[in-house]
Image: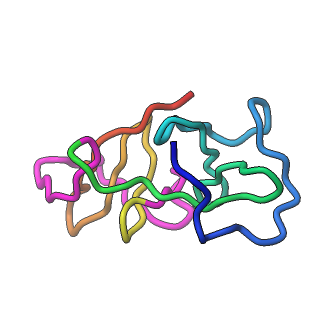
Amino acid sequence: MTSCTADHHPDHAHQHGPNCGHKAIRHDGHVDYLHDGHLHNVHADHIDEHVIEVSTANPVQCTPATKCSGHIHGQNCGHEAIPHGDHVDYLVKGALHHPHGDHCDMHGSVPLV
């Protein structure tokens, strides 16, 4: 289980939990909540900012055969942004999509709770 990170989300009034309305993602032995492009972990009296690590399950690689039917991921595309490594992916049915030229790179999946 991940210990407290140095990156805390300041002034977070929203109470995350099983029925809070945000997608819950199983991550590193605990549950994080996807909220406005941030991956939040409730930790005692504050919220930690988490990131999906680059790994064999969630690689950073070009997958040019992946097409999103003319859909272009980005701000207001209808899919939630999720931090992955040093960039942002978009969550599509549990899969991490990353816009790259004329296609989407598939960066693996995350288990939704």
Residue beneath the point at 56% across and 62% down: 76
Residue beneath the point at 37% across and 71% down: 86
Q: Position of residue 100 (x, y in %)?
A: 24, 66
Q: Is residue 3 magenta?
A: no
With 37 as the anchor, is 110 left or right in this view? Answer: left
With 55 as the anchor, is 10 left or right in this view? Answer: right
Q: Nearer the viewer, residue 39 or 93?
A: 39
Quarter of the image with the C terminus is top right
In this picture, which residue range is highlighted in magenta? Answer: 57-83
Q: Position of residue 11 (x, y in %)?
A: 84, 70
Residue beneath the point at 21% across and 69% down: 101
Magenta highlight: main SS: loop
Q: Position of residue 15 (x, y in %)?
A: 84, 47
Q: Nearer the viewer, residue 84 or 77?
A: 84
Question: What's the coloring here?
Answer: rainbow
Residue beneath the point at 14% across and 59% down: 62
Q: Nearer the viewer, residue 25 or 28?
A: 28
With 101 as the anchor, is 45 left or right in this view? Answer: right
Q: Is residue 68 magenta?
A: yes
With 95 as the anchor, is 49 left or right in this view? Answer: right
Q: Relative to residue 76, is residue 21 depicted above or below?
A: above
Name the quadrant containing residue 57.
Answer: top left
Q: Relative to residue 30, is residue 96 depicted above or below?
A: below
Q: Position of residue 104 (x, y in %)?
A: 26, 55
